[in-house]
């Protein structure tokens, strides 16, 4: 390793997306903008424009199918399924029909019409307040670019055409770009936008390529061939690293490799503290094809199945049968282990693809017509889902929970609809689990403050810390200007978590956490010390949480929580949790 002593070291902070450390020359990738022509087409030539669209869709389908085959051969079926979403975009009747209608009504050429329609879809998905779902805008953008290239008779540009052995630095990269990467050439990946749930990042993780996303302003200060270090653990890009930094990262890379080997060696060991307390670690999933990923990381079932993906991935409202098959697949995959299905959590910020008219635009979608409020208004859609979940419950340990519950009135109304569905299935002679457990998400302060009442009417609580913190602190967590105020360790957050846990336990029900706090090893001891019974997180985060749980005692966790509750600032609590984490990891790896 060498450093450029003539230039000062500059550190950029982003979001860690794929673990690992890499050092090398940076390559700034700026994808050239495609110029889309716009002109009027004579009436008698418009059928030919529509045919051109069909031909371009067929050509693009072949390209994507070839990429899928390549990814499956190189990385496996799970990663290849990313491109099934791309193929589904090409089958989206709404997208195709709107384009055809635009050609007929506007009289413009097919490229201009398709570009306008696809951009509306991209914007709609990008504005969704769900990191995973908003990233689907990148999938649509990728597919739309391919279709436009096909219409214009041009070859789609790929990142691999330009890449040598470099750390790639870009505004964002498409899943197709990521699939074209050669892991021997791409040392690391840095993007100014994007998120850790993007399909491009998923591919990078599968290739074991370190990645950092959300590095704002990086393209304004970095040029190609400058010396950089990428730290995928802490989310850093270091430009012109000093000799001391190079030496430190050389040692750190070796330490991390040893730690990861030890962590994965313990992945199939029980999740039990040093003083014998078992802590179930479950997984958050969006689709049924993630079951194997959960098993690979030793997840003990599913603590959160985000069912809204089934509504956003298809051009129509999903049928009872299609939902039943998805839920059944997951239930059967985990046998006796719990599979907790959250009912539809769509709203003004996440409109349903197949019925966008049901979700009028709102000034404050986070506080608007969403989740259980939508379901209780559109009972027909709600009942279709509940019937599918009930039928799937005959094939495993399915449990159900309702999102965005604000108090007992909504909970009772939701349970009444569920009971109605149970009576229907009983009359029809359809099997379902009669003692299915019903839980409530605790993500609104009013629910937390009335947790004693809610606990009398449900079987478990699942705390959604993402929204609970957002509502409690009045922080829009996707607003860059105030994101720094989003503070999981704020004293008010801790007090509210403690109150919910205590009220749940007083009523004899278990309390889990399925928000982002549950997957952060720094906060795991704090949550357990506050009395949380179970944790649910993204599957790849399970091994780190388990490793730490096995390195500490519950007595120590409770002492940590008591100490944190006595402090008066989030920063102090954060430092206390970080010190606890570092001390125990040092002992476990020393």
Image (tube, rainbow, N blue to C red):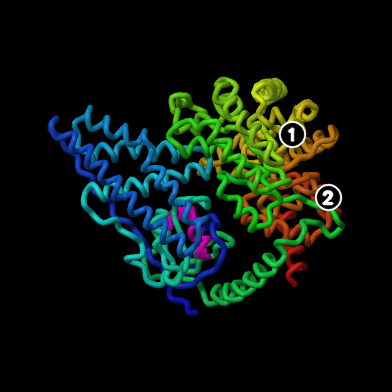
Q: Is residue 11 visible?
A: no
Residue 29 in sight in this render: yes
Is 258 included in the stretch rendered in magenta?
no
Region of the chain picked out in magenta, as a range:
199-218
Residue that extends furthest to the front in the rendered view of this protein: 429
Pointer 2 residue: 558
- 93 lies left or right of 544: left
Q: Is residue 223 left or right of residue 275?
A: left
The answer to which of 508 and 220 lies nearer the viewer is 508
- The residue pinned by badge 1 equals 437
**Left/right of residue 101 with respect to residue 301 in the rendered view:** left
Secondary structure category for the residue under label 1:
loop
Report if residue 204 lies within the magenta region: yes
Q: Quadrant of residue 543?
A: bottom right
Q: Residue at x 71, y 43 (%)?
A: 338
* Nearer the observer, 1 or 139: 139
């Amino acid at each position: 390793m060498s450093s450029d002593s003539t230039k000062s070291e500059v550190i950029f902070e982003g979001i860690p997306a794929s673990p690992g450390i890499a050092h090398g020359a940076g390559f700034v990738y700026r994808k050239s903008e495609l110029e889309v022509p716009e002109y009027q087409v004579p009436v008698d030539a418009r059928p030919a424009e529509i045919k051109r669209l069909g031909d371009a869709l067929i050509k693009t389908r072949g390209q994507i199918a070839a990429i899928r085959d390549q990814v499956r051969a190189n990385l496996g079926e799970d990663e290849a399924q990313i491109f099934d979403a791309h193929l589904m975009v090409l089958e989206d009747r709404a997208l195709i029909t709107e384009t055809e209608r635009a050609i007929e009504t506007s009289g413009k050429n097919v490229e201009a019409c398709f570009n306008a329609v696809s951009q509306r879809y991209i914007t709609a998905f990008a504005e969704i307040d769900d990191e995973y779902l908003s990233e689907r805008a990148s999938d649509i953008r990728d597919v739309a670019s391919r279709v436009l290239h096909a219409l214009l008779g041009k070859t789609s540009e790929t990142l691999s055409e330009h890449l040598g052995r470099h750390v790639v630095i870009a505004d964002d990269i498409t899943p197709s770009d990521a699939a074209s990467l050669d892991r021997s050439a791409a040392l690391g990946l840095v993007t100014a936008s994007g998120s850790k749930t993007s399909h491009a990042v998923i591919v990078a993780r599968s290739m074991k390529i370190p990645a950092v996303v959300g590095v704002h302003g990086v393209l304004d200060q970095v040029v190609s061939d400058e010396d950089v270090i990428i730290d995928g653990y802490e989310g850093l890009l270091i430009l012109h690293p000093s000799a001391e930094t190079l030496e430190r990262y050389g040692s750190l890379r070796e330490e991390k490799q040893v730690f990861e080997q030890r962590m994965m060696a313990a992945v199939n060991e029980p999740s039990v503290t040093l003083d014998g307390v078992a802590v179930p670690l479950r997984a958050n999933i969006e689709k049924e094809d993630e079951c194997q990923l959960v098993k690979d990381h030793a997840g003990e079932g599913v603590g959160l199945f985000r069912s809204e993906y089934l509504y956003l991935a298809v051009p129509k409202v999903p049928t009872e049968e299609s939902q039943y098959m998805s839920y059944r697949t997951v239930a059967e995959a985990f046998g006796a282990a719990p599979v907790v299905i959250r009912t539809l959590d769509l709203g003004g910020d996440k409109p349903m693809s197949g019925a966008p008219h049901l979700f009028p635009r709102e000034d404050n979608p986070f506080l608007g017509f969403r989740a259980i409020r939508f379901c209780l208004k559109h009972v027909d859609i709600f009942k279709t889902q509940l019937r599918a979940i009930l039928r799937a419950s005959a094939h495993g340990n399915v449990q159900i929970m309702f999102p965005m519950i604000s108090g007992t009135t909504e909970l009772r109304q939701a349970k009444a609809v569920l009971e109605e569905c149970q009576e229907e299935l009983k009359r029809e002679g359809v099997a379902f689990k009669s003692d299915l457990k019903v839980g409530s998400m605790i993500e609104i302060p009013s629910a937390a403050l009335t947790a004693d009442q809610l606990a009398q009417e449900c079987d478990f609580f699942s705390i959604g810390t993402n929204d609970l913190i957002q509502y409690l602190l009045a922080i829009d967590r996707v607003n860059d200007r105030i994101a720094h105020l989003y503070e999981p360790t704020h004293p008010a957050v801790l007090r509210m978590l403690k109150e919910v846990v205590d009220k749940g336990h007083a009523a004899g029900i278990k309390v889990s956490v399925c928000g982002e706090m549950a997957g952060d090893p720094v906060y795991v001891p704090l949550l357990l010390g506050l009395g949380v019974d179970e944790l649910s997180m993204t599957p790849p985060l399970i091994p780190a949480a388990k490793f730490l749980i096995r390195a500490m005692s519950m007595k120590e966790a409770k002492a940590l929580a008591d100490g944190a509750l006595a402090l008066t600032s989030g920063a102090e609590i954060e430092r206390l949790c970080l010190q606890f984490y570092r001390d125990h990891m040092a002992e476990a790896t020393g």
